[in-house]
Image (cartoon, grey):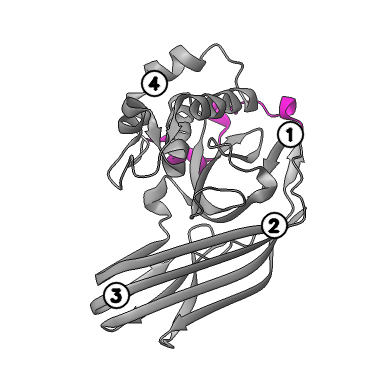
Amino acid sequence: MSTIEVAADLSYEVQRPTSFAFSIVAARTSHQTVTAESIQIEPALEHELVPYGGGSHQLVRLAADAGRLDVHYRATVVVDAEIHDTTSLPEVPFGDLPAGLLPFLNPSRYCESDKLADFAWRHFGHVPGGYERVMTISNWVNQSLVYQPGSTDASSSTTDVLLQRAGVCRDYAHVGIALCRALGVPARYVSGYGVGVEPQDFHGFFEAYVGDDWYLFDPTGMTVAAGLVRIGYGRDAADAPFATLVGDAQLTQKIVSVTASGTLDDEHGAASTA
């Protein structure tokens, strides 16, 4: 169990009336508890917290007129991941997968799993299916890519990242997701906060469905499961951006801070916070 303090400060110059949906609020799950939280909007605008996706994910929604907009989020989060022995988490046959998980096997905007089937089977087909195979994929991504801020942009897909062998956390997660799906393992993108992430920002990692649950993987290797605070999840980063807007506004500043109270436990095993 770990206690983590998260903070996010966003500033915008709004050119004309604009509607916003911010995905910055720590999720509520059976393994993640928010013990303190504040949302401050400047100027003081009406806003609402609305559930999104599976229900644990919440959006901050508001409308702003032209001018400066500042959004400040603070939370204290207790993460108590469920830990399992990795050897007891086999791959789930396609015919036994719950129907609700099937979308996480399909190609998506950034995770072009349909283009990577041959590549995935040549590199990982010999690894026993289940948690071990997914961890092998995550480790391969970590060792094969260079973490290089600015090397990718909002249009960069998995194949782009593999060609240049460089990217940031979301790209690492997308490659891991695409390779898992190419092998028949449901995988999904998770947005959140991570202790020790450098440079500090909203963090992207992924979950794979093995055994009978979703388990965390962070191919960047920057933090451990106890240092990850989840916000939301989706097929890829297109489903979980930190901000979505309709109108005309430019982000002028983004500051994210994540700190742990005490030392994080690096528990060995498969971790789930879903």
Q: Secondary structure at mark 4?
A: helix
Instruction: Quadrant for residue 245, please give it.
Output: bottom left
Q: CA distance from mark 1 to mark 3?
A: 45 Å
> Height in image: 182 above or below 238?
above
Q: CA distance from mark 3 to mark 2?
A: 32 Å
Pointer 4 or 3: first along the chain: 3
Disc on res. 260? 2
Q: CA distance from mark 4 to mark 3?
A: 44 Å
Mark 3 nearby-residue class (10 Å; few <14, some 14–19, many ≥20): some
Q: CA distance from mark 1 to mark 4?
A: 28 Å
- Residue located beneath label 3 in the image: 13
Q: Secondary structure at mark 2?
A: strand
Instruction: Quadrant for residue 128, please give it.
Output: top right
| Observer-nearest of 162 and 55 | 162
- Residue located beneath label 4 in the image: 117
Q: Which residues are magenta?
A: 85-106
- Residue located beneath label 1 in the image: 269
Amino acid, disc 4? Ala
Choose mark 4 or mark 2, whichever is in front: 2
Q: Among all residues in the image, which is located at the extreme bottom?
A: 44
Choose mark 1 or mark 4, whichever is in front: 1
